[in-house]
Image (cartoon, grey):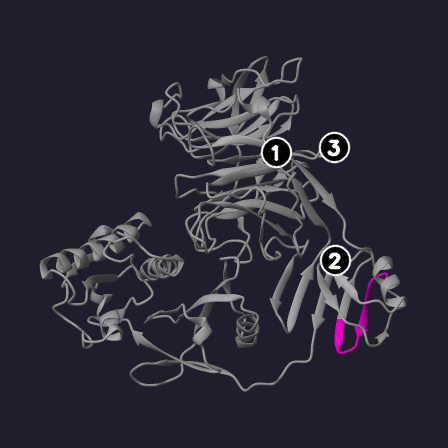
Amino acid sequence: MIIMRNKYIFGASSFLLLAFSFSTTLIAQEISSLVAINTPYDEQHPVISPNGELFYSVGFHPENLGGATDFGDIWMTKQGTSGEWENPMHVKSLSTSGNDVLVGFPDALTAYVYHSGDGVKIRQGIHQYARFGSEWNYVRPLEMGNFRNQGTHFSGRLSQDKKVIIMAMNSFGSYGNEDIYISEEIREGVWSSPVNLGTDVNTFSQELTPSISSDLKRIYFASNSNVSGRGRDIYTSQRLDLDSWTSWSEPEPLEQINTEGAELSYVLFDQDKSLAFYTSTQNSEGFGDILMITHQQEQWESVAEVLDQVDKKEDLKINQLAIKQDTVSNKEGLSKASTVVVGNTQALIVEDSIKTLIVEEERIKINRSLRVIDQQTKDALPYILVYTNAQGFKKTAANQEEFWLALDADQIKSFTISSESYIPVFVAETKKVANEIVIALQPISTGATIILDNIQFNRGTSDFADANSINQLDQLVEFLRANANVRIRLEGHTDNVGDPQLNKELSMQRASKIRGYLTLKGIDFERIRIAGWGGSRPLADNASDDGKAKNRRVEMIIDRLN
């Protein structure tokens, strides 16, 4: 039995935000009865119908309407009298030659299905079907404002109350490849334009296969933004503002189901039995297999229990955070919002059960500053600061105070400073950051050069060495997307150790590897030229190890502006 307890703790050591409306306990086990479902093909996106049938997408199956290259057709199975899942059936009446994903069932006789579109008979979008016996008849497309999927992936689910569709796709305003969006029903057949959930959840990486709890307060989704460089993992986040869709708690990984493989499509489908599905490539016969687990929830301490600790002069311990007691004040009137003071620590408790706790301690005042200037004129520049937090998610700092607090708490692994019409700067060595930071940005102009010194390669190869390398590459992708008129040249360099010709080939391979990553992320191949100089253009003396390290580099030069 595997047990996990999440500890929603955020912010710096001097400012902690704990959201602990409940903890999550997962007891994970594979159910043998799913063996009949999983094949050497790609099983994804399970959905349970009101009749208890299991519908899901199967990719690259030779019987799909688009053949073995078809990203997904709809298949289904149901449980026999003994409880075993029967052999799957291909639901051709819900499938096309493109990518098909079953989004949900408004009722037992209606289904919503996403189709990537074939350009002839059916357009891209979510479509409504009506059930007649074992077949499904096409009804109409759902009108969804400016819905547009600009990528190959789509995943989405209908909420339990049938009023919300949560989805992942590459669309307007996406921060990375795929982001999570919400659409709400306006009236039958008409839905709102998808709304991006914002940077609390979405990153410059991929966020996929979201599901939402029955009370619309918690989401589960997959992301490949983790700093370990593993495959996709499952995360959960709680909605903090029920009047909007853009305020969420820091995403927390579901550690006990995440593996070195790729996990997707976590969804709680049986509230009474606390059963959940998800898919994983770990130990899979094919691309991805469907697994079943039990999902249990336990509530954290009630306000009364906390007050009981206060009255007994005990040390408070909330979400594993111990608060040492000296004196306690302001205990009365906790029905809505009150303050408990424990020594120099102040806690704010909101609503009848504890929803949010803010703990603010006395902190040492340090004069700190972050200045961003033009490299040539030294004039101050407006800037945007985006940092990667401890969980690997991108966050835009609202102000300098937020940045320094997060840095103090070791919640910043790297950060990027950008300003319009300037080349951004990526900082990975946050441990070495001083209390006064001055960042000098180069204007975007022909001939401007920066060293991509955070892109590291494994020794003697063109393989990227670590997560910081991928982070800087992703920042470079964002820079080129935001400045479509910029064409660049990537020049690889080595030290002088080894065969000069092999060094030249290696430096070319490394520049080519970076170009390959950029083009894979959608940057036009023609915008990137490459060159390899081996050890012929050193920056420092090769007599020392430090000098050799400086000479092993890739430079980016602004080749021209269109």
Q: Which amino acid type is shown beneath numbered disc 3?
A: Asp
**Residue at 81% across, 70% down:** 340
Residue carrying label 1: 29
The residue closer to the viewer here, 359 or 529, is 359
- The mark that comes first in sequence, 1 or 2, is 1
The secondary structure that most of the magenta stretch takes on is strand
Q: Which circle, 1 or 2, is nearer the viewer?
A: 1
Residue carrying label 3: 272
**Residue 336 located within the stretch drawn in magenta:** yes
Q: Are marks 2 and 3 in contact (CB under 8 Å)?
A: no
The secondary element bearing badge 3 is classed as: loop
162 left or right, relative to 432: right
Residue 389 disc label: none
The residue closer to the viewer here, 322 or 46, is 322
Q: Are marks 3 and 1 in contact (CB under 8 Å)?
A: no
Magenta stretch? 335-346
- The mark that comes first in sequence, 3 or 1, is 1
Q: Are marks 1 and 2 in contact (CB under 8 Å)?
A: no
* Above or below, 342 relative to 39: below
The secondary element bearing badge 2 is classed as: loop
The residue closer to the viewer here, 10 or 440, is 10
* Above or below, 381 relative to 288: below
Residue 355 disc label: 2
CA gap between label 2 and label 3 equals 24 Å
